[in-house]
């Protein structure tokens, strides 16, 4: 017997309609690419998103069409999020930090009909336009006064396009499983692959972000997402902020510590979210200038593991709670959050930090398990580590246009490519990415563990640890490190440093120094490139 409850579809348009109606005067503050700080509110964003939907309809955009964006975090990008998905089209955020040829590949693979660009990226599309034959026009996210001189004849001015409409528009109602947005993973191997979200998955994910043990987003918050809107939908924050009527503070292109800090203080920011590299810059600025955070009470750190010293500084020195979170583009992206439990209240501070260092517990909606290479589930004892598998209503069931083939098994488990432990309380800890693990004589060595210890050696600024083929042990670890400027640190000193914390069989067989390490477009170490470069490296032990 079915329940007798209305089967109203979960649509992204309902988020902005709600915010416009019930939190109409709550602000969205943006540092614009043009320069000044801009202020709008949910009432205006809802109205302008509707105007944009009207305008796109006149341009011939239909249900399911893909609309690209190359843009920073700002109010026009928020209007595009809601206007495009709200009308039933697909908002395809493109990471502008990718190589131009990857951007062209992605826009063509997605078959973007129009691409919206911030002023910053006009030169980029001028260079790429001839490789994008299917794109009908490029909408420059500015007003007439700032429209650039350009060699392209199909540039459209955003303000002119939007303000030509009257906003007399009702959001259409359609199937909640209709695709809403598309985001390609940065593709450390092969071509980038598209993750296609739906209206339903996005709304359900937003409920989760708003729960207290999710990210706890509510209308008392002023949120500054440093994580870009082109990186897994800024971790779902724009949608969750609309759902709860939270103020949003958008940093635009200015991502340095000083600019972010200034906005945080000026706009009473209570919550922010970003990757560890960003917080390193922010904390550096705050420390150097002897500042403190007057309103921020919590920050979400994810994308890479948050280092212990960073968590300690936020919590102990600045009284800012750290929510260590894990997820991935394929998961919308939220999977786990590292909140402490009631029973941890009386633990000594450094034991609390030990718990926060783990990536956290599954949020409601995400099933987690760890499995061995044959798919057998491993115990949740905090020691056994294996492939981390996930399933749930905001996790991908396959990449756009079938790339990568079947990615879920018969029971819908998706292999995250991460290797992790799960403890009896459900806290998950990433030990490595499965392709980065070093398989030495039947044992697994976590490249991340060795890297973290190597970075602790005085004189080492950054380190990558990769597997190098070995005749006896299959693979052995090699440390590739960047020295502090003019520091005389040696190979022997790095190994001696590691001997104090690592078991003998985990010690690297060699250490080499380089000027610079390669990174992906999302700022992570590009180990595929290193493995390629060092595949014939002769270890002294070989
Ligand atoms: P990409 O795959 O393009 O780097 P994603 O943002 O989807 O982009 O990356 C997801 C991956 O990032 C995860 O599979 C995991 O390896 C890593 N990751 C995310 N959050 C954390 C975290 N808190 N600690 C360690 N690794 C993390």
Image (cartoon, rainbow, N blue to C red):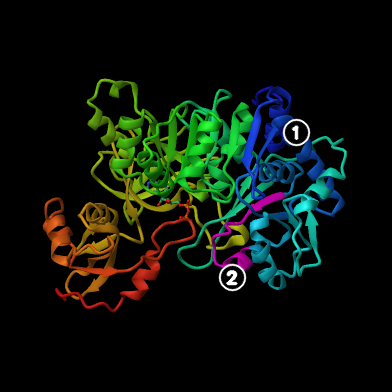
Q: Kindly indicate the quadrant of the structure image that contains residue 454.
A: bottom left
Report crowding for label 1: few under 14, some 14 to 19, many 20 or more residues within 10 A (C-alpha).
Answer: some
Residue 44, labelled with which disc?
Answer: 1
Q: Position of residue 445 (x, y in %)?
A: 23, 57
What x and y, as percent, mark residue 322?
38, 34
The segment highlighted magenta reads 90-106
Name the residue at 55% across, 67% down: 99
Q: Cβ–Cβ below 8 Å for labels 2 and 1? A: no
Which residue does the numbered mark 2 point to in the structure image? 101
324 or 176, nearer to the observer: 324
For the N terminus, give its image quadrant: top right
Residue 168 in sight from this viewpoint: yes
Image x and y of residue 212, in percent = 47, 25
Residue 484, magenta (yes or no): no
Compute the Cα span from label 2 to label 1: 37 Å
The label shown at residue 170 is none
Residue at (88, 38) in percent of width and height: 166
* Residue 267 versus residue 516 in the image, above or below: above
């Amino acid at each position: 017997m079915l329940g007798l409850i209305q089967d109203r579809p979960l649509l992204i348009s309902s988020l902005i309609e709600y915010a416009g109606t019930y939190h109409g005067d709550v602000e969205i503050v943006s540092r614009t690419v043009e320069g000044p700080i801009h202020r709008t509110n949910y009432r205006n964003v809802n109205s302008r998103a509707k105007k944009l939907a009207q305008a796109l309809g006149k341009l011939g955009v239909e249900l399911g069409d893909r609309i690209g964006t190359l843009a920073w975090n700002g109010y026009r990008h928020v209007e595009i999020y809601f206007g495009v998905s709200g009308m039933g089209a697909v908002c395809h955020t493109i990471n502008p930090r990718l190589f131009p040829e990857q951007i062209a590949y992605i826009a063509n693979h997605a078959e973007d009909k129009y691409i919206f660009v911030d002023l910053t990226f006009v030169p980029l599309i001028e260079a790429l336009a001839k490789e994008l034959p299917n794109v009908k026009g490029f909408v420059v996210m500015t007003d007439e006064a700032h429209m650039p001189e350009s060699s392209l004849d199909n540039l459209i001015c955003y303000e002119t396009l939007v303000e030509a409409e009257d906003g007399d528009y009702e959001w259409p109602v359609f199937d909640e499983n209709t695709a809403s947005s598309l985001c390609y993973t940065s593709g450390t191997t092969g071509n980038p692959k598209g993750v296609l979200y739906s209206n339903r998955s996005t709304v359900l994910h937003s409920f989760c972000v708003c729960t207290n043990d999710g990210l706890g987003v509510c209308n008392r918050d002023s949120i500054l997402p440093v994580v870009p809107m082109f990186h897994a939908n800024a971790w779902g924050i724009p949608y969750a902020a609309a759902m709860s009527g939270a103020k949003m503070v958008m940093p635009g292109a200015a991502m340095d510590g000083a600019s972010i800090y200034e906005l945080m203080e000026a706009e009473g920011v209570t919550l922010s979210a970003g990757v560890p590299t960003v917080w390193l810059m922010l904390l550096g600025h705050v420390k150097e200038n002897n500042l403190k955070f007057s309103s921020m009470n919590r920050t979400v750190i994810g994308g890479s593991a948050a280092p212990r010293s960073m968590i300690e500084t936020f919590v102990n020195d600045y009284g800012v709670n750290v929510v260590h979170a894990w997820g991935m583009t394929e998961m919308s992206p939220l999977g786990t959050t590292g909140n402490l439990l009631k029973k941890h209240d009386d633990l000594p501070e450094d034991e609390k930090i030990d718990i926060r260092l783990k990536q956290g517990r599954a949020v409601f909606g995400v099933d987690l398990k760890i499995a061995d290479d044959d798919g057998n589930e491993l115990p949740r004892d905090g020691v056994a580590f294996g492939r981390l598998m996930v399933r749930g209503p905001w996790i991908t069931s396959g990449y756009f246009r079938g790339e990568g083939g079947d990615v879920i098994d018969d029971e819908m488990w998706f292999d995250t490519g991460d290797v992790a432990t799960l403890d009896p309380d459900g806290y998950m800890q990433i030990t490595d990415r499965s392709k980065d693990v070093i398989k030495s004589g039947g044992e697994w060595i976590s490249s991340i563990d060795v890297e973290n210890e190597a970075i602790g050696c005085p004189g080492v600024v950054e380190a990558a640890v990769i597997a190098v083929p070995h005749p006896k042990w299959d693979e052995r670890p090699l440390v590739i490190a960047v020295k502090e400027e003019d520091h005389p640190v040696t190979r022997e000193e790095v190994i001696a440093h590691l001997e104090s914390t690592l078991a003998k069989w985990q010690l690297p067989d060699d250490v080499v120094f380089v000027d610079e390490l390669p990174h992906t477009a999302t700022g992570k170490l590009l180990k595929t490139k290193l493995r390629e470069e060092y595949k014939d490296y002769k270890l002294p032990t070989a």
